[in-house]
Amino acid sequence: MLSEFIQQLRHKHGFTQELLASELKVSRPTYVQIERGERDLTITEAQTLAGIFSLSLEDFLACRDAAIAVEVEKEPAVKKLKKHEAVRISVPQKNLEKFKEVLLYILSKVGGKPNVGETVIYKLLYFIDFDYYEKFEDQLIGATYIKNHFGPTPVEFETVIKEMIKRGEIVRVDSKYFDYPQRKYLSVREPDLTKLKDARELRHIDEVIARLSDKNAVELSEYSHEDTPWIIAKENEPLDYEAVFYRTPKTSVRNYD
């Protein structure tokens, strides 16, 4: 299949999706559609890609490349297992240690605000992860978020919280917010920011907190319901990071011009 062949060629040459989109003079979301087999190439686009990959147009359209043929022959099972990875530049990998420190940082900054309960924390973590992926095509925490009625929920949260409470790093407080039950968490120790990769990650976290932390649980849930990854996911199924490239202007945080 040509779309899979293009993915394999891109990985072989170490090209990013954004680079090839630029060469084809299309947006990155449009290029993603090409790799997913959801959009056909024009003849001009096919000629451009063939030239970039140093193939004749005939070989390109016939999906002929000796190096890739050998690779597929050696590792058919691996290729099948990694079907979804071919779409992403950096497949999010769970980093629970970073998860803990980002959570502690959020709590140290806004955990004491009356509107910041468990649901708000869920949404702050979600937008930190998915906004970062849209902006930089890379993971920050890389947590798994599932779709439920109240919006994206991080699967790892319960395990992480239980461990941190047991270690005395966080305390749970059951309170009320406008007469509604609210579960809050307060940090006991300072976050270890050396777990972050660079200053860009911290700056991004601060931006999301500044933009969203004044909203209450209902407002953030409604906002998350307008986000494409949540809209296209099935109930109780994981949200796809790649869907951020199909966001509408309501939730998109990246300038594609």
Image (cartoon, helix red, strand yellow):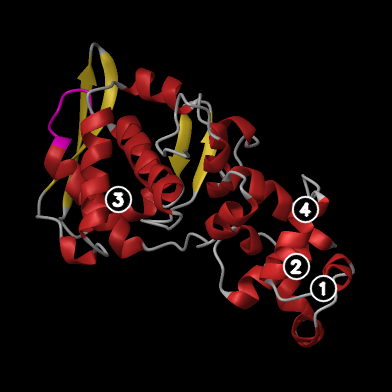
The secondary structure type at the circle numbered 2 is: helix
Q: Residue at x 77, y 75 (%)?
A: 55
Nearer-the-camera pick, 146 or 201: 201
Q: CA distance from mark 3 to mark 1?
A: 55 Å
Q: Is 224 inside the magenta-drawn segment?
A: no
Q: Earlier in the sequence, mark 1 or mark 4?
A: 4
Q: CA distance from mark 3 to mark 2?
A: 51 Å
Quadrant housing residue 118:
top left
Q: Which residue is mark 2?
A: 50
Residue 22 has which mark? none
Q: Earlier in the sequence, mark 3 or mark 1?
A: 1
> Magenta segment, which residues?
110-116
Q: Residue at x 77, y 88 (%)?
A: 74
Residue 30 locus on image (x, y percent): 65, 44
**Residue 239 appears in view:** yes
In the picture as drawn, the residue positioned furthest to the top comes out as 178
Q: Which residue is mark 3?
A: 161
Residue 110 locus on image (x, y percent): 16, 35
The secondary structure type at the circle numbered 4 is: helix
Q: Earlier in the sequence, mark 3 or mark 4?
A: 4
The crowding category of the residue bearing disc 2, from other C-alpha atoms within 10 Å (few below 14, some 14 to 19, many at least 20), is some
Type of the residue with mark 2: Ala
Type of the residue with mark 1: Ser
Circles 4 and 2 in contact, beta carbons < 8 Å: no
The crowding category of the residue bearing disc 3, from other C-alpha atoms within 10 Å (few below 14, some 14 to 19, many at least 20), is some
Q: Earlier in the sequence, mark 4 or mark 2?
A: 4
Circles 1 and 2 in contact, beta carbons < 8 Å: yes
For the N terminus, the image quarter is bottom right
Number of marks in the rendered image: 4
Residue 169 locus on image (x, y percent): 16, 55
243 in relation to 34, above or below: above
